[in-house]
């Protein structure tokens, strides 16, 4: 790999590799970002599973949520931990509107119609933000969690990421419970399996789709709401997260929420190790390569059927 | 028995030849070539129409919607640039190597990708763009993230570089004729019908003796090689290249969106899409300048949403709808008129 | 000489045995009917022969060569072409282009392919629709398109999967006429059919499947009197009627 300019020399690398703490630290970082990916992916996964639609504007939804949280913090001094609710609600509405105004009309068209239409929406949202808010990176300072860290022996655990991870697990658990053990969830599952049969049983599938788009939006809204605590906001921030979410969902398997959680963690850990032990630029190469390797052997993802 | 299909094809070709002749004569019209911005817009329309048409082979005719064509575009661009900048020769050997490499890469990545269907295929092609983009950014041999800048060199066919827009205009027209010519030839050829059959139903096609895997692979290779050729024009026109100019996801999406906008799987579609989109992009940018950053893309986003929802067959579909209505209004006799 | 020969062909889906050691032959130039109640494994057997499924065990030979496990297009190229029970028109292509795709299998230049396609379209009475999109045809038209397309591929063996199901009696008559004309031109046919009235008079031999097993293989007039077949499938009533019809025709 010499041609690519490895940043760590051999002697140094040996030291790093042999330190157990380093391995653990890299693992923890990976798990924490993996949980965030899983939360972003969960919303996409829900929509994909129920409607067989990819919302290409998913990353832009995340970016919008980040701006909501950022502006609430910057203008009104609200901490992201509180704005997370506002961001979730805002993107819920955005999701509902997206379904009502766009996705609804792509049903029955070629399978990629929804993808292309939502890509148009992504362009619209991204460039609207670029136009209004400029391409500048914006960072919130003086948040409650700020740069706080928790030291566990040699290990450093960043508090904002830890809190995000906990929130992610909570939200994913809630969504999973909602789908698997409520009346609404059964209606959703029935709709996902056979739309026409569900309609014959008296389920209003239009409303199910609407709500699923809303809930999918809310998931990514919550993720975006908390992120300005430790990540800069800019119009391009959503694109990469969106792509990683697609990877997680496709790798996890068609609409499987546990699959998306597992894939999110896998992506986070692979990214973290590749970034540290090979070179930072290779972390996404490793992630996308991992996806190709997985689907080459399991076409429908790890948990797909 | 007289075959009506054949007569239609001849009529169509006449219109195309007339179109090419008009485009070829345009710069000779006094005053036309003086406005270099107008020339620039025309050049870009020809370039993007060719790019979209190259994509259309695989995405439109063969039905395999790839979001990864910027990879081939980039490989073609780097082929020419490496020959000229790094090795100081004419771009020609680089062009040939670049086109061959694009075809090779296409065949290699087709192996895992064509096993996938629908969304999984789409996401796999995204992943490939990201991988290539990031590899190119750190690859010192090809100039890394900084890219390659052309030195000042002599103009002409040897270097494939011109100081005036007119030279590029004809270069773009030749590119356009090559790409559209290939697609036009495919359209009336056995392989063209096989591509459409694979798009419409792979199992049905196989039941009629069509080796669908081979058809898709060949379509991919042809599409990639022509895309690489478009990349050559791009770099020769811009006189520099870096990874984000060519191998970005945004670039990959342009291939798809222009074709969808114009009408996928039709010969005219890519030209129609480019003829609408490129002036929109260039004139809004010129009008608002730096202040209106993103306005063109906001409008483009809106158009794409409306098009997918209201008119999935694209601009060509709109025209066909109008023609059918006219034909209906005039009764059956109207069916003969109007070739696109 | 047997054109198609099945030897102990078995197909399993998990625990379910869809075809259980089925053996029979199809003689060149003949029409063989394949009948049986729903779920007997007729379409599965078709899928095995045409390469859509790879048989679990057994051997299928066509024209003297082993074709077991070949891909569908390889088998089609050897000359065994099928239609689909659930029609599969290439929707966004015209009727003519649909048939043309079939014609390109044997005709490598445009001129002969166009002629071949036009001929098959005329034979299946689709000429008035040839410039319409195949997706817009009514169901009877789509069934005829399935046939025209397969026919254009110039098969030695034509495998028809319920091309007459769901047609009116006039349409069935027209289809039967086409089939007889094809037989005269020397094409061997294997026909899965539910419409008994249509298949019995034209078949040279009938193979009966029940629950994946071959329970009878004989001339049609003997099949209708076979007790096992009557029990499994035809029902006493139809058998009676068939007998009356035949004695009536004889006297």
Image: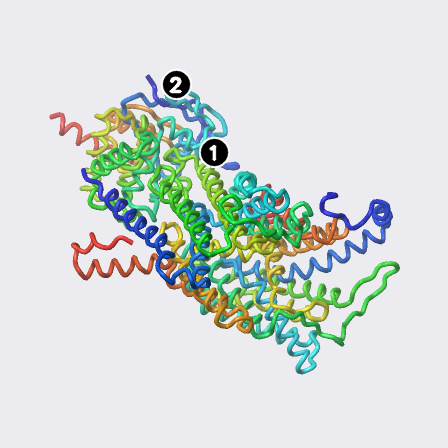
Query: Which residue in the protein does label 1 denote?
Result: C17
Where residue A96 appears, x then y in whole percent? 51, 70
Instruction: Judge the density around disc 2: few (<14), some (14-19), many (≥20) Cα neighbours within 10 Å.
Output: few
> Do marks 1 and 2 both belong to one polypeptide chain?
yes
Q: Is residue A38 left or right of residue A273?
A: left
On the image, numbered disc 2 is attached to which residue?
C64
Who is closer to the viewer here, A122 or C164?
A122
Q: What SS does tag 1 mark?
A: strand
In which image quadrant can residue A101 be found? bottom left
Q: Is B306 on the left-hand or right-hand side of B163?
A: left
- Residue pushed farthest bottom? A76
Q: Quadrant of the N terminus of chain C?
A: top left
Mark 1 nearby-residue class (10 Å; few <14, some 14–19, many ≥20):
some
User: Which mark's residue is nearer the viewer, 1 or 2?
Assistant: 2
Visible residue check, residue A305: no
Left or right: C132 as drawn, with respect to A42? left
């Amino acid at each position: 790999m010499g041609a690519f300019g490895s940043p760590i020399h051999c002697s140094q690398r040996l030291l790093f590799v042999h330190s157990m703490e380093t391995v653990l630290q890299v693992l923890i970082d990976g798990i924490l970002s993996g949980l965030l990916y899983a939360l972003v992916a969960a919303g996409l996964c829900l929509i994909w599973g129920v409607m067989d639609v990819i919302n290409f504007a998913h990353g832009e939804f995340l970016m919008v949520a980040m701006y909501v949280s950022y502006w609430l913090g910057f203008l009104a001094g609200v901490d992201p931990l509180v704005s997370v609710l506002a961001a979730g609600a805002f993107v819920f509405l955005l999701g509902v509107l997206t379904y009502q105004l766009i996705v609804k009309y792509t049903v029955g068209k070629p399978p990629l119609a929804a993808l292309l239409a939502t890509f148009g929406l992504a362009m619209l949202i991204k460039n609207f933000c670029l136009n209004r808010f400029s391409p500048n990176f914006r960072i919130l300072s003086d948040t409650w969690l700020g740069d706080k860290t928790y030291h566990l022996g040699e290990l450093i655990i960043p508090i904002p990421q830890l809190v995000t991870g906990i929130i992610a697990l909570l939200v994913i658990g809630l969504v999973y419970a909602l789908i698997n053990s409520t009346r609404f969830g059964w209606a959703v599952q029935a709709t996902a399996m056979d739309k026409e049969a569900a309609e014959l049983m008296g389920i209003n599938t239009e409303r199910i789709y609407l709500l699923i788009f809303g809930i999918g939006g809310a998931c990514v809204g919550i993720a975006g709401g908390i992120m300005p605590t430790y990540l800069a906001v800019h119009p391009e921030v959503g694109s990469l997260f969106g792509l990683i979410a697609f990877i997680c969902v496709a790798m996890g398997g068609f609409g499987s929420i546990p699959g998306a959680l597992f894939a999110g963690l896998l992506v986070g850990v692979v990214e973290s190790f590749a970034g540290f032990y090979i070179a930072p630029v290779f972390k996404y190469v490793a992630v996308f390569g991992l996806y190709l390797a997985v689907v080459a052997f399991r076409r429908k993802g790890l948990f797909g059927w | 028995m007289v075959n009506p299909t054949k007569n239609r094809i001849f009529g169509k070709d006449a219109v195309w030849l007339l179109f090419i002749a008009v485009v070829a004569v345009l710069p000779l019209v006094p005053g036309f070539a003086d406005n270099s911005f107008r020339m620039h817009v025309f050049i870009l329309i020809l370039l993007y129409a060719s790019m979209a048409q190259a994509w259309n082979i695989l995405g439109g005719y063969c039905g395999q919607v790839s979001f990864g064509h910027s990879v081939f575009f980039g490989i073609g661009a780097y082929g020419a640039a490496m020959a000229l900048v790094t090795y100081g020769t004419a771009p020609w050997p680089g062009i040939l190597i670049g086109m061959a490499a694009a075809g090779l890469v296409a065949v290699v990545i087709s192996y895992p990708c064509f096993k996938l269907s629908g969304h999984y295929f789409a996401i796999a092609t995204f992943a490939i763009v990201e991988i290539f983009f990031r590899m190119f950014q750190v690859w010192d041999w090809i100039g890394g993230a900084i890219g390659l800048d052309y030195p000042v060199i002599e103009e002409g066919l040897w270097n494939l570089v011109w100081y005036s827009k007119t030279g590029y205009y004809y270069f773009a027209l030749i590119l356009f004729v090559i790409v559209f010519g290939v697609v036009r030839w495919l359209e009336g050829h056995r392989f063209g019908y096989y591509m459409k059959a694979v798009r419409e139903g792979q199992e049905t096609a196989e039941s009629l003796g069509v080796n669908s895997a081979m058809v898709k692979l060949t379509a991919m290779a042809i599409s990639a090689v022509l895309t690489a050729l478009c990349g050559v024009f791009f770099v020769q026109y811009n006189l520099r290249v870096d990874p984000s100019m060519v191998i970005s996801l945004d670039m990959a999406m342009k291939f798809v969106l222009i074709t969808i906008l114009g009408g996928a799987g039709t010969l005219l579609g890519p030209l129609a899409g480019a003829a609408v989109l490129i002036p929109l992009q260039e004139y809004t940018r010129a009008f608002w300048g730096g202040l209106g950053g993103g306005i063109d893309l906001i409008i483009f986003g809106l158009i794409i949403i409306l098009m997918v929802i209201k008119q999935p067959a694209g601009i060509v579909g709109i025209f066909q709808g109008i023609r059918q209505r006219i034909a209906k209004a005039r009764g059956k006799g109207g069916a003969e008129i109007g070739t696109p | 000489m047997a054109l198609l020969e099945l030897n102990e062909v078995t197909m399993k889906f998990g625990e379910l045995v869809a075809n259980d050691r089925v053996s029979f032959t199809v003689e060149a130039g003949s029409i063989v009917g394949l009948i049986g109640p729903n779920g007997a494994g007729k379409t599965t057997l078709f899928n095995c022969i045409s390469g859509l499924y790879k048989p679990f065990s057994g051997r299928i030979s066509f024209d003297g060569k082993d074709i077991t496990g070949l891909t569908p297009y390889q088998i089609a190229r050897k000359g065994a072409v099928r239609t689909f029970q659930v029609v599969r028109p290439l929707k966004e292509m015209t009727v003519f282009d649909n048939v043309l795709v079939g014609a390109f299998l044997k005709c490598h230049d445009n001129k002969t392919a166009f002629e071949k396609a036009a001929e098959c379209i005329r034979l299946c009475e689709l000429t008035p629709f040839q410039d319409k999109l195949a997706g817009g045809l009514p169901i009877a038209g789509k069934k005829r398109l399935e046939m025209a397309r397969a026919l254009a591929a110039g098969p030695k063996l034509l495998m028809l999967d319920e091309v007459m199901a769901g047609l009116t009696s006039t349409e069935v008559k027209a289809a039967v006429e086409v089939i007889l004309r094809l037989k005269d031109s020397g094409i061997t046919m294997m026909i899965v059919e539910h419409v008994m009235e249509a298949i019995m008079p034209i078949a040279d031999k009938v193979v009966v499947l029940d629950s994946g097993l071959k329970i009878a293989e004989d001339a049609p007039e003997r099949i209708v009197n076979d007790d096992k077949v009557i029990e499994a499938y035809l029902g006493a009533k139809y058998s009676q009627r068939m007998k009356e019809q035949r004695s009536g025709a004889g006297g």
